[in-house]
Image: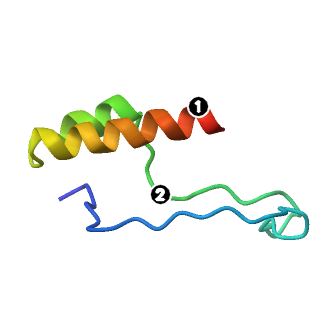
Amino acid sequence: NTHVLPEYVLSFKLASDKGHEKVGVEGQPMKPSSPWMPFPALISVLSKILPPSEIAFITKFHKEYRVST
């Protein structure tokens, strides 16, 4: 199995990002180390195991997130 399908995802933003950025050994900001996949590819994989109502829910909140950032 190559995909993790969490039951819940918790996301939050800090009021101020100053002083909270993780820095690597060389003083550079750290990047995620997990594999990345485009959102349409993720939806394609999820649609094989989740009902259409949940896919619509995920897509709706992703669109709202994209508009707000």
The image shows residue 47 at horizontal and vertical percentages of 15, 39
- Disc number for residue 34: 2
**Amino acid at the residue labelled 2:** Ser
In the displayed structure, would residue 25 be above or below residue 28? below
In this picture, residue 38 sits left or right of residue 15: left
Q: Residues within 10 Å of mark 2 (few under 14, many from 20)?
A: few
Element marked by disc 1: helix
Q: Residue at x 39, y 35 (%)?
A: 39
Mark found first going from the N terminus, 2 or 1: 2
Q: Residue at x 74, y 66 (%)?
A: 14
- The quarter of the picture where residue 53 lies is top left
The image shows residue 7 at horizontal and vertical percentages of 26, 68
Element marked by disc 2: loop
Q: Distance between the residues labelled 2 and 1?
A: 25 Å
The image shows residue 27 at horizontal and vertical percentages of 89, 63
Residue occupied by mark 1? 67
In this picture, residue 45 sits left or right of residue 48: right
Q: In which quarter of the image is the C terminus?
A: top right
Q: How crowded is mark 1: few (under 14 residues within 10 Å), some or many (20 or more)?
A: few
**Amino acid at the residue labelled 1:** Val
